[in-house]
């Protein structure tokens, strides 16, 4: 990558036992960049896709948080814990009733669609300026308002009592730990998350991510930079609009520009030479700037196979 344009998205596989922040800190040192962040926290023991945003791409963080996600989750039945996963204190154990695939799948249908979910105490949400997990570690429990989330699909991948494995396709704000606990309660025996792997975040898949072994072993950024995708890979779901030079000048200065016959809604905006200018909002044959990037040079935006 041209060192003058140190920006883009690096999908990596987060390994177990490290925080998302620690992954970012490691890559900040290896890539030698100051502006870097991630596109959605994973719990320390969870693994899987963690999109890393670099340079100008950090401006696209709000769009990544909107992406749908897919997880492979193993649920341990017959146990309830303080954290809703197996890292917490066991609060109760119960006998597991006789369950077959049909009974479990019938119960899973109750969790598909727009559902209400109460965020767990062990979460990064804030209450009174403090993270909920900080309060939880002090033994403090506070009321949490239920939130509406979307579960697009849940598939039972494996059943080996006391554990079952689920593939979960969900929208933003979903706590899979809470889903595991709620499922256990619905089955009458309690449940806790035993393991979790995030297999996809929007267009970024685990199969195309830089492996955790490569990330952990990186000593210098050359091989990692070779895997960085262009910033507009995060915007691939939006239609593209290309502007000529006079309109580019206006757009990058925050002005609405005419786009006859253009699409309505969110668009990704380019100059005539293919440089990505940012995100716009199309309406009534115009495009209004929504989020500007210092024009990223034209690069192939095809995700790795």
Image: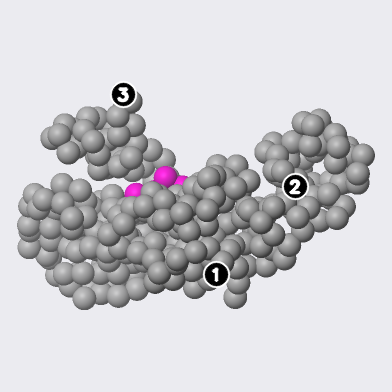
Q: Residues within 10 Å of mark 3 (few under 14, many from 20)?
A: few
Quarter of the view holding residue 147:
top left
Task: Say if the magenta span includes residue 91.
Answer: no
Q: Nearer the viewer, residue 17 or 155?
A: 17
The residue positioned farthest toward the top in the image shown? 128
- Of discs 2 and 1, which sits in the foreground? 1
Q: Is residue 285 above or below residue 298?
A: above
- Tag 3 or tag 2, which sits nearer the N-term? 3
- Tag 1 or tag 2, which sits nearer the N-term? 1
* Region in magenta: 171-175
- Quarter holding the N terminus is bottom right
Q: Position of residue 303 (x, y in %)?
A: 62, 67
Q: Position of residue 199 (x, y in %)?
A: 44, 66
- Of discs 2 and 3, which sits in the foreground? 2
What residue does disc 1 label?
223
Q: CA distance from mark 2 to mark 1?
A: 24 Å
Dot 2 falls on a residue whose secondary structure is strand
What residue does disc 2 label?
295
What residue does disc 3 label?
128
């Amino acid at each position: 990558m041209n060192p003058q344009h140190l920006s883009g998205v690096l999908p990596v596989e987060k390994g177990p036992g490290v925080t998302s922040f620690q992954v970012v800190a490691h890559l900040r040192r290896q890539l030698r960049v100051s502006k870097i962040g991630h596109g959605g926290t994973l719990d320390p023991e969870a693994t899987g896709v963690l999109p890393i945003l670099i340079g100008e791409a950090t401006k696209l963080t709000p769009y990544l948080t909107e992406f749908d996600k897919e997880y492979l989750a193993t649920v341990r039945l017959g146990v309830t814990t303080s954290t809703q996963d197996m890292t917490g204190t066991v609060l109760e154990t119960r006998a597991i009733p006789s369950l077959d695939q049909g009974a479990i799948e019938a119960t899973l249908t109750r969790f598909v669609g727009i559902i209400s979910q109460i965020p767990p105490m062990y979460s990064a949400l804030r209450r009174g300026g403090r993270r909920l997990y900080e309060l939880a570690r002090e033994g403090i429990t506070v009321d949490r308002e239920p939130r509406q989330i979307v579960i697009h699909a849940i598939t039972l991948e494996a059943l080996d009592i006391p554990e079952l494995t689920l593939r979960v396709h969900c929208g933003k704000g979903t706590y899979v730990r809470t889903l595991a606990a709620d499922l256990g309660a619905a089955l009458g025996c309690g449940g806790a998350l035993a393991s979790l792997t995030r297999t996809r975040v929007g267009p970024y898949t685990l199969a195309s991510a830089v492996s955790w072994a490569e990330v952990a072993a990186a000593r210098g950024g050359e091989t990692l930079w070779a895997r960085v995708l262009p910033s507009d890979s995060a915007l691939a779901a939006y239609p593209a609009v290309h502007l000529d030079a006079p309109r580019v000048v206006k757009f990058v200065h925050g002005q609405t520009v005419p786009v006859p016959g253009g699409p309505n809604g969110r668009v990704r905006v380019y100059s005539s030479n293919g440089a990505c200018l940012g995100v716009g909002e199309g309406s009534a044959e115009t495009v209004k700037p929504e989020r500007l990037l210092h024009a990223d040079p034209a690069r192939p935006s095809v995700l790795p196979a």
